[in-house]
Amino acid sequence: MMRPGELRKILRAEPFEPLRIDLSDGRSVLVRHPDQAFVAERHLLVGLAKLERCRPLATPRNGDRVVKDWMIINLVQITGIEPERDANGRNRTKGERK
């Protein structure tokens, strides 16, 4: 299980790099800005750019704080966390985001 402190440390890393959170049901969520995710003792709350049933699951672009929906993820569902990669397989940085 992902520990809350470990997840909080990843989300607060400086400089923040957008990351993809993989879930046990095969879905993944793109977190573009750390202010769009809130870590609780057993859950991660993520603000989504679109309704949860839409794909891809992602937070709003450019750190926009207005979200359309929330997704509550039990920390035991997190199977991995990876940096967001561009079409060439490179990590995206703030200057490269589309």
Image: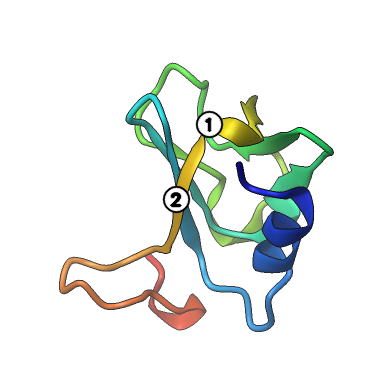
Residue 23 in view: yes
Residue under pointer 2? 80
Q: How is the image coloured?
A: rainbow
Count of all numbered marks drawn on residues in the image: 2
Q: Relative to 8, is 27 above or below?
A: above
Q: Secondary structure at mark 1?
A: helix
Q: Amino acid at mark 1?
A: Gln
* Residue nearest the viewer, comparing 83 with 94: 83
Q: Residues within 10 Å of mark 1 (few under 14, many from 20)?
A: some
Who's the residue at 45% across and 79% down the image?
93
Q: CA distance from mark 2 to mark 1?
A: 9 Å
Which amino acid type is shown beneath numbered disc 2? Gly
> Going by the picture, which residue comes out furthest to the left?
88
Estimate the x, y position of residue 91 in percent, counting from the top left. 35, 76
Mark 2: few/some/many CA within 10 Å (<14, 14-19, 20+): few
Residue 77 image position (x, y, % from top left):
53, 31
Quadrant location, the C terminus: bottom left
Quarter occupied by the N terminus: top right
- In the picture of the structure, the residue carrying the numbered disc 1 is 77
Residue 68 seen in the figure:
no
- Of 84 and 75, the residue lying toward us: 75
Q: Nearer the viewer, residue 87 or 41?
A: 41
| Residue under the point 57% across and 61% down | 62
Q: In the picture shown, does residue 68 fall above or below 64?
A: above
Residue 90 quadrant: bottom left
